[in-house]
Image: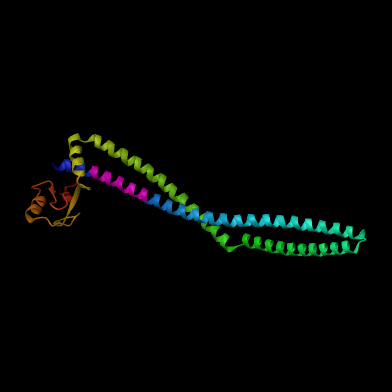
Amino acid sequence: MDRVQLNKLLLLQEREEKLFRLLREKTKILEEIRSFSDKLNNIDNEISAIYQQKNDISKDIEKTIKDINTYEKSLKNMESAIKGIKSKEHYKNILRERSKTENMIINAKNRLKHLRLKLEQLENSEELKYLKIDQAKIKDEITILEEDLYSIETSIKNAQKDIIDYENSLDKELVSLYKDIKKRVVPVFIPLDKRACSYCGNVLPIDSYNKIIQNDINIFMCPVCQRIIYKSSDMI
């Protein structure tokens, strides 16, 4: 492999590394969206539970008002019935029933007052207020992340097309050689770092190092990680 071929494959590797970075970024964004979606789901459930409480209390209020109206109507009927009663026993029964109904009205009105207070507390609760604030913030975060995801996916498609187009411009045997090596190690090409492989840190034998530096050999395979080492200065 001469210097020109090396540079062509290095440019191919750069394109693939760019694609890999984009795919990794996409995975990261998807994980963030998933995390925020889980948080949003929990908040939605908490808000729904509060609204369900409000709905249940409203139904209780409606039922209690109907009960009060029923009791008051019954009380009026008793008042009218008392006027025409002649039997003492019947009269006592009506009075007992009236007293019982009056107590039921008092209890129902107290319950109604308690329910309305509870409903007002829920509607004005700090918990609901902050849940809605958090809900809005998380929705905004998800929207931003989804926009980033769309942008990344567009970049991935462009990067994939760029790789295909570039591979098609290269000699097929050269590309095949590169892909064969890539089956064993990724990345294939690693720059020399002083006297060592910049991937695994293996220090090259002095004679091999000298040959690379003096351009006596174009490439050298690291005996430890099996990657091809090159000089940065060889990049065109």
Q: From the viewer's perspective, is 116 left or right of 101?
A: left
User: Could you tell me which quadrant the N terminus lies in?
Assistant: top left
Where residue 89 sits: x, y (%)? Answer: 88, 63
Q: Quadrant of residue 203?
A: bottom left
Give the quadrant of residue 94: bottom right
Magenta part of the protein: which range?
11-27
How many numbered discs?
Answer: 0
Residue 105 shown in magenta: no
Q: Is residue 15 magenta?
A: yes
Residue 143: % across, % down: 47, 49
- Residue 73 higher or lower than 179, as above or below: below
Towards the viewer: 221 or 236: 221
Residue at horizontal 20 percent and vertical 42 percent from the top = 9
Can you give x and y, in whole percent of width and height, for residue 29 in the image?
39, 50
Residue drawn at the location 18% of the way across and 55% of the way down: 200
Residue nearer the viewer, 190 or 202: 202
Q: Is residue 175 left or right of residue 105?
A: left
Q: Please identify the dominant SS of the magenta region.
A: helix
Q: Left or right: where does residue 149 sit relative to residue 89?
A: left
- Tell me which residue sits at (76%, 58%) in the image: 68
Picture residue at 40% right of the left edge, 45% below the top: 151
The C terminus - image quarter: top left
Query: In the orientation shown, which residue stands out farthest toward the left?
Result: 207
Say how the picture is coloured. Answer: rainbow
